[in-house]
Amino acid sequence: MNAVQNSVNATAREAFAGVAAAMAMPNLTPSQPGKTVVAAGVGNYKGYTAMGLGATYRSRDSRWLVNAAASLTQHGDTGVRAQVGYEF
């Protein structure tokens, strides 16, 4: 029974760290066309902390947004994401 409980606890810890990692990824929008925003973030969920870095670029014609971010938990796990958007 202890082995099952330990497994459940380990899974919960990884899930909490994953939530913190997702929260830490910044997603800020540039103020003008042709500009880039570089940002840092931190997330904490149920005592598990992560840090994140990200960048967003708005095209010169202001129709495209490109965003990427990465995060790192206190246990060394990493997460990444990328997004592209078109406005019409």
Image: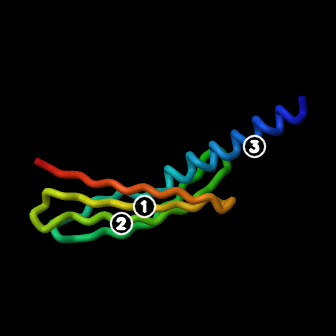
- Amino acid residing under circle 3: Ala
Q: Which of the two labelled residues, at mark 1 and mark 3, occupies the earlier sequence position?
A: 3
Can you give x and y, in whole percent of width and height, for residue 19 in the image? Answer: 56, 46
Kindly identify which residue carries mark 2: 55
Q: In the image, is 77 to the left or to the right of 2?
A: left
Drawn side of residue 68 relative to residue 44, left or right: left
Q: Residue at 31% x, 64% y: name it.
A: 56
Q: Name the residue: 60% across, 46% down.
A: 45
Above or below 8: residue 45:
below
Q: Position of residue 7 (x, y in %)?
A: 79, 38
Give the mark nearer the N terminus: 3 vs 2.
3
Question: In 3D space, how far apart are the residues under numbered discs 1 and 3 (Cα atoms)?
Answer: 26 Å
Crowding at mark 2 (Cα within 10 Å: few <14, some 14-19, many 20+): many
The amino acid pointed to by label 2 is Ala
Quadrant containing the N terminus is top right
Q: State the scheme by which the image is colored.
A: rainbow
Q: Earlier in the sequence, mark 1 or mark 2?
A: 2
Q: Residue at x 41, y 58 (%)?
A: 26
Pick out the residue farthest to the right: 2
In the image, which disc is placed on residue 10?
3
The residue singled out by tag 1 in the image is 69
Q: Name the amino acid, label 1.
A: Ala
- Mark 3–mark 2 distance (CA, rounded to whole Å): 32 Å
Q: Kindly state the secondary structure of the residue where label 1 is placed.
A: strand
